Image (tube, rainbow, N blue to C red):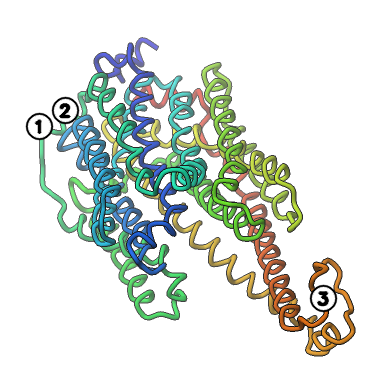
């Protein structure tokens, strides 16, 4: 291990402060990930404050996601020229300042602009944090570091609606932004005090080099248009709307041109040569698949609880909170096992098996389901996610040379972010389409003769409420029947989506054997 340290030295002072560094970057990561979901429950309140339509207020979320998605793959390139510590500190400072401006915004235009700035600044925190952890911790401790850091990445989006709902109900929607200030200040001070740039970053700053302006332009077009299509395509009826077709086509063309540009440019924005590493490719596939399922189900669960079960945002958040606790426990277990020298590769496959089993359990939910069933089935899925994340993250960043870790992290998080966006878009679209299918099938069994019989004879339908059969209210009776059909159609659509996820996750289980074993990954990282 002494030889490994000589080849891959830790930054000066990192050995004694590595866990303080981990805490500092985790705070920054938590801020960024939390802000992608905490605002969602406050949108109705913001809509009233700015006298905006639902479509207009949605840009508060879209603007953040677009800016964030564009900037994530550029973080390594910027860090190599400005220094990772300086860029991380600047990002935290600008993020906190933009949060204050968001909270004080007096118009819709102002808050959309400030959210753009906030998303662009926050983009650096996740990939930079991963690169900092890999550079700070020795190979045998990286899974543990990723597990601790992963608490912010995985728990924050789950806790976001809970925290946001409580703040909005008890204080004001503006405090969803102001709460970032003390956390951001703590992250800034700790990072400033303990973090130092490694030699590879310092050397890169002195070399400089040509700027890949064409790559930057193509990156902005490809990722920006893709994020807009994924976030707003459903409102526009997808490819039945011309602008969606044109935006998707231009995004695809930009991606192709970006790939051709980056493999031929000496100092590209995206280092696509990293894909030559098989371990990186496998880790990317598994991580993107996990993000696809994780963020999609994070969206589905509050919708189910609030729209079908009648929970408030606060009640739904409390019901989903145990998922975050289960994920934390699984992350810590994975980290501790990696420190004992046990090969944790099979646990990634186990994680996908557990997640698939949890989705299969969820596919059997019904409308009278208890809160306890929602809690424990959701916790099962979260345990699976917690077993997957540390190993795939550590593997992806440990299989590349130390001076390319930043580029690997940027590419890793760009694809992870894209997988999450596609998962959310695909699951919401599937939910709507399946609900329409089930509604048409259920209505087929309720004819005009059933409606006449209901109004004249008082015959009862199984499971329908008693007030449906009160005399003299035929129109109200039919309205209740229609609402029952809608609710049952939505429930069946949720079942379908979770069943599809459960089946689609199964082929991912054996892919864990393509990952390098923990010991081999550590020795490879040391050699780099």
Between discs 3 and 2, the one toward the N terminus: 2
Kindly identify which residue carries mark 2: 202
Q: Which mark is residue 451?
A: none
State the residue in front, 331 or 444.
Answer: 444
Query: Mark 2 Cα within 10 Å, few/some/many (few <14, many 20+)?
Result: some
Helix, strand or loop under label 1: helix
C-alpha separation, residue under disc 3 versus residue under disc 2: 79 Å
Q: Which mark is residue 470?
A: 3
What's the residue at 18%, 45% (across, down)?
A: 267
Image quarter for residue 186? Answer: top left
Marks 1 & 2, CB-CB < 8 Å contact? yes
Is disc 3 in contact with disc 1, using a CB cutoff of under 8 Å?
no
Pick the quarter of the image with the C terminus: top left
Judged from the image, the secondary structure of the residue bearing numbered disc 2 is: helix
Residue picked out by circle 1: 206
**Left or right: 130 in relation to 364:** left
Q: Residues within 10 Å of mark 3 (few under 14, many from 20)?
A: few
Element under disc 3: loop
- Dividing the picture into quadrants, the one containing residue 352 is top right
Q: Is residue 451 left or right of residue 227?
A: right
Mark in the foreground, 3 or 1 = 3
Task: Give the left or right position of residue 175, taking residue 323 as reference.
Answer: left
What residue do we see at 73% from left, 58% from top?
A: 367
Which callout, 3 or 2, points to the residue nearer the camera? 3
Measured Cα–Cα span from mark 3 to mark 1:
82 Å
Name the quadrant containing residue 43: bottom left
Residue 506 x/y as whole percent: 65, 49
């Amino acid at each position: 291990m002494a030889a490994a340290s000589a080849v891959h030295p830790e930054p000066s002072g990192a050995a004694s402060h590595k866990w303080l560094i981990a805490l500092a970057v985790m705070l920054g990561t938590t801020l960024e990930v939390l802000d992608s979901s905490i605002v969602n429950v406050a949108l109705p309140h913001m809509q009233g404050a700015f006298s905006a339509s639902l479509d207009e207020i949605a840009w508060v979320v879209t603007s953040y996601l677009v800016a964030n998605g564009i900037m994530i793959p550029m973080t390594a390139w910027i860090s190599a020229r400005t220094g990772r510590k300086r860029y991380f500190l600047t990002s935290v400072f600008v993020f906190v300042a933009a949060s204050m401006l968001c909270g004080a915004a007096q118009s819709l235009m102002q808050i959309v602009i400030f959210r753009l700035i906030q998303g662009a600044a926050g983009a650096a925190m996740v990939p930079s944090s991963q690169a900092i952890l890999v550079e700070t911790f020795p190979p045998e401790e990286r899974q543990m570091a990723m597990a601790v850091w992963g608490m912010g990445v995985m728990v924050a989006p789950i806790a976001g609606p809970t925290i946001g709902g409580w703040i909005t109900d008890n204080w004001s929607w503006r405090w969803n932004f102001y709460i970032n200030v003390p956390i951001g200040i703590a992250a800034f001070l700790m990072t400033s005090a303990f973090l130092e740039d490694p030699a590879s970053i310092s050397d890169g700053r002195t070399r400089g080099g040509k700027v890949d302006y064409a790559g930057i332009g193509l990156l902005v077009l490809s990722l920006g248009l893709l994020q807009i299509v994924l976030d707003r395509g459903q409102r526009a009826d997808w490819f039945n709307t011309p602008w969606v077709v044109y935006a998707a086509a231009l995004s695809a063309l930009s991606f192709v041109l970006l790939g051709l540009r980056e493999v031929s440019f000496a100092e590209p924005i995206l280092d696509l040569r990293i894909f030559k590493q098989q371990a990186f490719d496998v880790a990317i596939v598994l991580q993107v698949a996990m993000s696809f399922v994780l963020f999609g189900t994070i969206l589905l669960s509050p919708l189910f609880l609030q729209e079908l079960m009648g929970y408030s945002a606060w009640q739904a958040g409390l019901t989903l909170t145990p998922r975050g606790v289960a994920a934390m426990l699984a992350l810590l277990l994975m980290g501790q096992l990696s420190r004992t020298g046990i090969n944790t590769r099979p646990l990634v496959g186990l994680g996908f098996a557990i997640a698939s089993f949890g989705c299969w359990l969820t596919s059997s939910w019904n409308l009278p389901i208890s809160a306890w069933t929602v809690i424990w089935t959701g916790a099962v899925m979260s345990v699976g996610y917690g077993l997957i994340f540390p190993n795939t993250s550590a593997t992806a960043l440990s299989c590349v040379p130390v001076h390319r870790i930043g580029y690997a992290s940027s590419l890793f998080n760009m694809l992870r972010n894209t997988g999450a966006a596609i998962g959310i878009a695909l699951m919401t679209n599937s939910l709507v389409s399946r609900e329409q299918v089930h509604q048409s099938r259920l209505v087929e069994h309720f004819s005009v003769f059933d409606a006449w019989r209901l109004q004249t004879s008082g015959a009862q339908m199984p499971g329908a409420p008693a007030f449906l059969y009160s005399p003299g209210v035929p129109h109200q009776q039919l309205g209740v029947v229609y609402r029952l059909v809608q609710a049952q159609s939505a429930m069946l659509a949720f079942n379908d989506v979770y069943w599809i996820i459960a089946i689609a996750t199964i082929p991912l289980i054996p892919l864990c054997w393509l990952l390098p074993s923990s010991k081999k990954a550590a020795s490879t990282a040391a050699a780099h």
